[in-house]
Amino acid sequence: MLSLEDVSISYDGTPAVLGASLEVPDGSVVAVLGPSGCGKSTLLRAVAGLERPVSGRIGWDGADLAGVPTHKRGFALMFQDGQLFTHLTVARNVGYALRLRRVPDVAQRVERLLALVGLEGYGARLPGTLSGGERQRVALARSLAAEPRLLLLDEPLSALDAGLRERLAGDLHDILREAGTTTLVVTHDQEEAFALADRLVVMRDGRIVQQGDIADVWARPVDAQTALFLGYARVLEGAAAARVLAVVGLDGGAVALRRSALTVDSEGPAGGGPRSDLGGTVRTVRATPDAIRVVVAVPGIGEVDALASPAARTAVGEQVSLGVDASRLAVLGRS
Amino acid sequence: MTSRRATRTTSSASPARAARTTVAAAALGALALAATSCSLVGGDDDTGQGGSGESDTVVLLTHNDFFLPDEVVAAFEEESGYQLDVRPTDGVGNLVNLVSEQAGKPSGDVVFGVDNTFASRVLGADALTSYAGDLPPGVATYALPGDDEGDLVPVDNGNVCVNVDDVWFAKQEIEPPVTLDDLTDPAYEGLFVVPSAASSSPGLAFLLSTIAEYGDEWPSYWEDLLANDTEIVAGWSEAYQSEFTQGGGDGDRPIVVSYDSSPAFTVDGEGGTTTSALLDTCYQQVEYAAALDGADNPDGAQALLDFMVGPDVQAALPESMYVFPVADDTELPSDWATFAARPSESYEVDPAEIEANREDWLIEWTDIISR
Amino acid sequence: MKRAAGLVALATLPLGVLTVFFVLPVVGMLGRGLWPDGSFDPAALYDVLSRPRVGRVIWFTVWTSTVATVVAVVLGLPAAYALHRLDFPLRGVVRSALLVPFVLPTVVVGVAFRQLLREGGPLGFLGIDGTPWAILAGLVFFNVAVVIRSVGAAWESLDRRPGEAAAALGATPRQVFTSITLPSLRPAIVSSASVVFLFCATAFGVVLTIGGVRYASVETEIYLLTTVLYDLPGAAALSIVQLLAVVALLAVSARVRRVPDPTVQRATPRPLRPRRSDAPQLIATGVLLALLAAPIAALVAESLRVEDRWSLGHYRNLATTGGDGVLVVPVTTALRNSLQTALDATWIALLLGLLVSVVLTRRSRSATERRVRSVLDGFFMLPLGVSAVTLGFGFLVTLGREPLDLRTWPLLVPVAQALVALPLVVRTLVPVLAGIDDRQRQAAASLGAGALRTAMTVDVPIVLRPVVAAAGFAFAVSLGEFGATSFLSRADHPTVPVVIFRLIGRPGEGNYGMALAASVVLAATTALVILAVERLRVPAMGSW
C-alpha cells in the first residue's frame, strides 16, 4: 500500500504540493483529479522518485521511500505522451523492463502483453509509425511488463481524441482490474477519473481538498469549486438554494446542480414529481441526441439549466415550470 | 502542468541575468567594433589591388621569414616608382617548389629566399632569368657554384654553427667542445640537441656539415652522436627555445645547433654574451634573389634586384632577417659587430651534389635516427 | 521537381566554394604527382606505396589516431554531461576555456608539454616523454573539446523524460545511460569521433613537436616528400591514401551513426544541481580539466617570468614589435588582424555550414536523393582528412595566378579557415537538425508558414544553441589556424599564430617571453569572446 503523509514539494522555491496525505490500497485504482497546474503531476513524479519532497513522508507498506532511487521503487510511470523510446521497436519497448530483469521468454511475454492491449503483430514497428492511441497502448504494455508494485499513470488518455479516449478508458479499466495492478492515476478529466478509478482525490492549488470513494465524492462535493470541477453545471447559494432544495424537502446553504437536476414539466405544474413553485422564461434551447437542453431564467434565482422532453417542443420565450430530481443534485457543506 | 515546468527553458530571465546579458552583449559588440571596424571583408587597407598584370607593381615571391622595415620598402617604391607586392609562402622548400612548378609562367616577378641547399632545384627547373646589373663589391664571392648564367643574386648569408652555453660550462668546470668530433665524446653525453634535418633548414645544414666533414662515413658519425644521447627535435624553436639552457624554456642541454649570429642575442648586459658559436662547425647558408623567367614586369624585377643588393637593404638585413649582408663595407649593428663572431672557413657541399643526393641522405638519416 | 531545385540552389554556394578552394588545389597537386610528365604513371604510385617506410607510417598514423579518438571520447563524455546537464558555479567559464587548446600554437604547447613531461618536470614521473604516449596526450589535449562541445550540444537539449520512463521501469542509472541516453547521443558521438579521428590523422605539429622526430605520420611524411624532397608522386600517393581513408571512415561512420529513427525529443531541460550520484562524472571532469590546464598553467607561469622574476614585462612588450624589431607589426595589431579574420571566417563557416546542414537533413523522398545526400555529406568532410601541405601548396600553384589569382583577395584567408571549420560546424548542426520531427515543419507549413517562416518557427529555436556552439568552434579554429594561414597570409597582415611562430623562431629571452605572452593573450581572448557569445542567452523556444 502506498501512503503519503503530509507531503510538500517545491519547485524552484515555489511550493507545488502542500501537505498532501493519501493512501492507495493494494489492488485499488486511485485517481488524483485536478485542474492543470494544481500540482498533481509533481505529486506523481515524487511518488516515482523523480522529485524530492521538501517535507512529509512517502511510504510503501510502512517503509519510507526517501532515498530509494526511482529504479528501485518498482513503480512504473507512464507519461502523458507515452515517452516511447523512439530508437527501439514496439517489441523492444515493451520488452525493455523484461530484458533489464533478464526474464526468460521475452518474446512470448511481449506478444502476450501486446495482445492484452490489442496490438498483436505490431512488434516490429517503430514508435514513429504509430497513432497516438497505439502509442499509449504500447506505453501501457511496457509499463505492465515491468510487473510494477504500483502503476503511475500521468494523464494516460488526455492526448487522445474523444471517441478513442472513451474506448481506451474502458479497455484500460478492464486491463487494470484483470491484472489486479495497484494504480495511481492523475488526470484533469473527470470522465477519465470516473472511468478508471475506485477512489478519487481532488486537488486544487497544491492541496488535496477532498478524497474518498468515488461515488461519495461524486455525491457530496466538499465545496462549490469542487462541485463545478466534478462536472456540476451550477451552484446556487442562500435563498436560491433553499428554494430549489425546498422542492424536494431538503435544506442547506448551497446546492450544486447537474444539468439534468431540473426538468421542464411539460404537463404544467400539476405534472408528476414533487410540486414545484419554480418557473421562468426559456432563454435558449439546444437539442442533443438524448434530450433537449434549455436555459431558463427563474425570477429570484437567475438562469438555470434544465432538461426538456423532446416531445414538448419547448420554445424560447415560453413560460415553463420546473421540477427537481433529488438524485441529480448535491447539498454542499457550509464551507 | 508541472512536468512542463521541468523542461522549460529559462525564458523568464531574472533581472540580474538580463543585466549580465546586456553587459556581455555590450562587451562583445565593443570588442567586435574595436577589432574589425565592422569590416566583414578582413581588411581595412587598400593594398589588395594590383595583380601581376599591372606593370607598376613588382610581385616578390618569398618565404615567411622575409621582412623589411617600412621605410626601406618606401625607399624602394620612391626610387623605382614601382609598388612592392610581397607574397610570402610557408618555408623555403615550398617557395622553391612553387617557383619550379611555375617555371616560365610565374605568379610573381622576383623570388627571394632560395638558399644554397635548394638553389640547384630552381636552376634545374629553368625558372629564372639572368640579372643584368652590376654586383656591389664583395657580393660575387657568394655566387652559387654552377650558376653559369648569373641568375642568382646573393643577398645575405649566415652560418649554421653549433652553439654552446658558456655560463653552463664555466659553472660545471668543463671545457666546451670545439669540433664536430668532440660532440661524440662521452664528456658531452646528453648535452647536445639538434633540429631535425627532415623538417628544419638549420637541421639540414648541420647534416650537410657532417657530410662535408666525414664524407661517406657520416652515418657512423650520426650513430655515435645518438649513442652519446644527442637529442633530435622537430625544429630550431624546439631545439633552442625549449631544450637549450640559454633558450627561453628552461632547457637542460647546453649545446645546440643554431647560427653564428645567435650569440648577439644572448648579451648578458655586463659587456659579454652567455653563448658562443663553435666556428669550426659551421655550414654557410647564402640566400639568393632572382628574376623569374616570363614575369609580367621584367624591368621592375631588375630594379628590385638592384635594390636588394643596394645599401638600404644590406644595412637592414641583420635586424630584420637575422642574417649578414653580402656587400662589403656594410655597417653591422654594434651587438653583431661585437658578439657575432664569424668563421673564417665553413663547410660546403656542392649544390648539384646536394640536389642529386638529398633524398637518399635524408632517408638514410631518418632511418638512423628512428632506430 | 521544385523541391530538388531548391535543394540544389541551397547546395550551390557551399559546393562552389569547396570546388574552388579544395577540389581545384587538391586535384592540381594530385595531377602533378600522378602525371609527372604529362603521362599517367601508376608504377610510380605502386612504387611509393610498397616502400616499407610508408607502411610503417600508415600504421603509426592509424593506431595513434584510433587510440587518441577513443581516449578523447571516453574522457569527453563525462565532461560533456557535467558541463551541459549540471549547473554549478563557473560552468560557463569552464566551457569557454575548453576551446583554448584549439587556438594555442602547437609549437608553444610543445614547449609546455616538454617542460611538464621531461625528467624532473611536474609530470616527469609518467615517463612518457618522447614516446608515442606523449603524442597521444597531445592529440587528446587538442581534440577532446570537440567531443565535449558537440556531444554536449546534443546532450543539452535531450529530453529527460525518456530516461525517467526507463528508470521508472526499473533501469538503473547505468542502464538508462546505455539503453536510452547513449543511443540518442550516438549520432553526435560518432560524428565528433570521426572529426577527432581526422584531426588526429592529419595532425602535424603535435607529432613533430611533442613526439620528437622519431615518429612519422602520414602527414609529416607528406610534408617531407613535398617540401624537402620535392617528391610529388610520393606525396600524391600518400594524399590518395588519405582520401581513400577518409572516404572509408565516412562510410563506416555514416553506418554506425544511422539510427532507426533520428527524431529526438528536444526540450532543453534546465540544468540540475549536481547530486551525489553525479560525483563520478564531476570527478572525471575535474581530472580532465586539470590535465588540460596543466600545460596552459605552465605557459602562463612562464610568460610571467622575466629574468627569473615575476613581471608583466612580456605583456607590456606586446604593443611593440619585439626585441630588435622582429615583427612587422606589434602583437596588438596582429590580434586585431586575427579577430577580424576570425569574424569573417566564422560567418562564412556558419553560412556554408547551415546551408550544408539543411541540405543534408531534409527528409529524402527517394533512394537516389538519399544517396546524393550521403555523398554530399562526405564531400564536405573531406577537407579535414586531406593533408594541409597538399592543400596549401595546391592553393599556391592553382590559385596564385591567372585565371584564378586570389592571392590578394581579402577573404582568401578567412575562406580557407572557414573550410577547416566547416566540417565541425556541419557535424554539430546535422545531428540536431536531423532530430527535428519533420511533422513539426509540416504542421507549421499547414498553418500557413512559408519555408522561411517554418524554419524560423521550428528549426531555428532548436538549432540556436548548437549554432552558438558551432560559431565558437569556427571562431576558435580560425584564431588558432596556422597551416593554411602561413601559406596564404600577407606579410603586412599577420595573424597572432603567425607572429608567435616568428617570435619563438628567434633567439633571445624577450622574444620567447613575448611568444608565450601572445599565446596567453590569444587564449584569453578566445575564452572571453566565446564566453560573451554564450552569455547572449539563446531565446526560449517558440519565441519567434
Image (cartoon, rainbow, N blue to C red):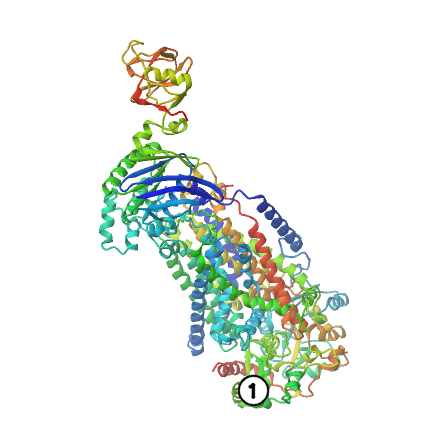
Of all chains, the one bearing label 1 is B
Q: Residue at x 64, y 66 (%)?
A: C517
In the image: residue C117, left or right of residue C434: right
Q: Mark 1 points at which residue?
A: B189
Q: Determine whether, in the image, residue C527 is placed left or right of residue C362.
A: right
Tell me where residue C463 appears, x and y as whole percent.
48, 49
Camera-side residue of C209 and B175: B175
On the image, the x and y values in percent for residue C320 come to: 71, 65
Query: In the image, A227: left or right of B82?
Result: left
Q: Residue furthest front?
A: A62
**Residue C411 visible in the displayed image:** yes
Q: Which amino acid does label 1 sit on?
A: Glu
Q: What crowding class fits label 1: few (fewer than 14 Cα within 10 Å), some (14-19), or many (20 or more)? A: some
Q: How many marks?
A: 1
Across and down, in percent, residue A107 comes to: 24, 52
Q: Does residue A85 appear in this view?
A: no
Q: Is mark 1 on a helix, strand or loop?
A: loop
- Along the viewing direction, whichever of C84 and C147 lies nearer the viewer: C84
Query: In x, y percent, where is residue A79?
Result: 36, 43
- In which quadrant of the rendered view does residue B240 lie? bottom right
**C78 vs B183: above or below:** above
- Specify whether C71 is left or right of C120: left
Would you place residue A6 above or below residue C338 in this image? Answer: above
Q: Image height check: is C220 above or below C350?
A: below
